[in-house]
């Protein structure tokens, strides 16, 4: 699963800034990207949005606890 943090810009809805999101994938496992560099993501709140891809930062995968 591809997880990101959306940093946003000055025109971004303040409720979306800094939120974690997940890339919406096609059937072949690739992210849905537009020709202009946008990307379709789903935020933790359940909201699906088309955002500018260069404003996304990858989040390290969470480590699984053993024991």
Image: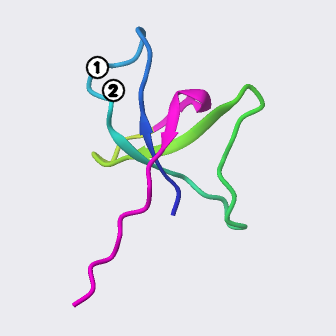
Query: Mark 1: which secondary structure?
Result: loop
Write the residue at 72% across / 67% down. Answer: 28
Which residue sits furthest left? 67
Query: Label 1, on which residue?
Result: 14
- The span shown in magenta is 49-67
Write the residue at 71% across / 35% down. Answer: 34
Which residue sits furthest top? 10
Percent position of residue 32, x then y: 66, 47
Q: Report if residue 43 lies within the magenta region.
A: no
Percent position of residue 1, x then y: 51, 63
Quick check: 50 left or right of 29? left
Query: Label 2, on which residue?
Result: 17
Which quadrant holds residue 43?
top left
Badge 2 vs badge 1, beta-carbon distance below 8 Å: yes
Percent position of residue 45, x then y: 27, 45
Write the residue at 21% across / 90% down. Answer: 67
Percent position of residue 20, x then y: 36, 44
- Neighbour tally class for label 2: few under 14, some 14-19, many 20 plus, Cα within 10 Å: some
Write the residue at 43% across / 33% down. Answer: 6
Q: Report if residue 61 lies within the magenta region.
A: yes
Residue 39 circle label: none
């Amino acid at each position: 699963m591809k997880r990101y943090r959306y940093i946003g810009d000055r025109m971004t809805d303040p409720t979306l800034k800094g939120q974690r999101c997940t890339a919406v994938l096609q059937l072949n496992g690739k992210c849905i990207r537009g020709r202009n560099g946008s990307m379709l993501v789903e935020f933790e709140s359940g909201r699906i949005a088309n955002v500018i891809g260069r404003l996304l930062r990858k989040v390290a995968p969470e480590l699984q606890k053993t024991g």
